[in-house]
Image: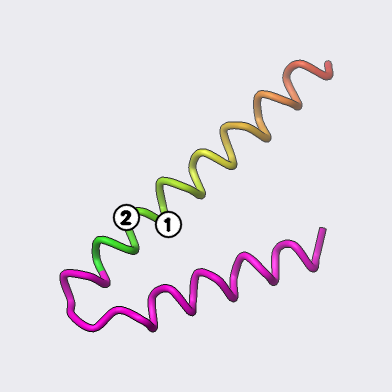
Amino acid sequence: MMEETQAFENRVLESLNAAKTVRSFMLKAVELLAEAVSILMLQTSVKTIMR
């Protein structure tokens, strides 16, 4: 789990650092935030189902 978290953090930082403009940085940040929310929603759903 810790390795997955670190890999995700690295991917986020690499994606944001690759942005050439403020606009591309903001678009990537929104995209990554949407992905993070989706992951959290899936984790919450699984925990709810497992109860």
Q: Quadrant of residue 9?
A: bottom right
Q: Amino acid at mark 1?
A: Leu
Amino acid, disc 2: Val
Which residue is drawn at the image coordinates 70% and 71% (left, top)? 6
Q: Which of the numbered marks, if any, corresponds to residue 48?
A: none
Classed neighbour count for the residue bearing mark 2: other residues with Cα under 10 Å, few (<14), some (14–19), many (≥20)? few
Q: Which residue is mark 2?
A: 30
Majority secondary structure in the magenta region: helix
- Residue drawn at the location 55% of the way across and 71% of the way down: 11
* Position in image of residue 8 (x %, y %): 62, 65
Q: Residue at x 59, y 40 (%)?
A: 40
Spatial CA distance of label 1 from label 2 is 5 Å
Q: Residue 46 colored magenta?
A: no
Position of 45 relative to 18 (above/below): above
For label 2, the SS is: helix
Which residue is found at the position 76% from the left and 16% from the top?
A: 49
> Do the CB atoms of the residues marked 1 and 2 lie less than 8 Å apart?
yes
Local SS, label 1: helix
Figure check: 27 above or below 50 = below
Identify the image's colour scheme: rainbow, by chain, secondary structure or one colour.
rainbow
Residue 23, percent from left and from top: 16, 70
Magenta stretch, residue numbers: 1-25
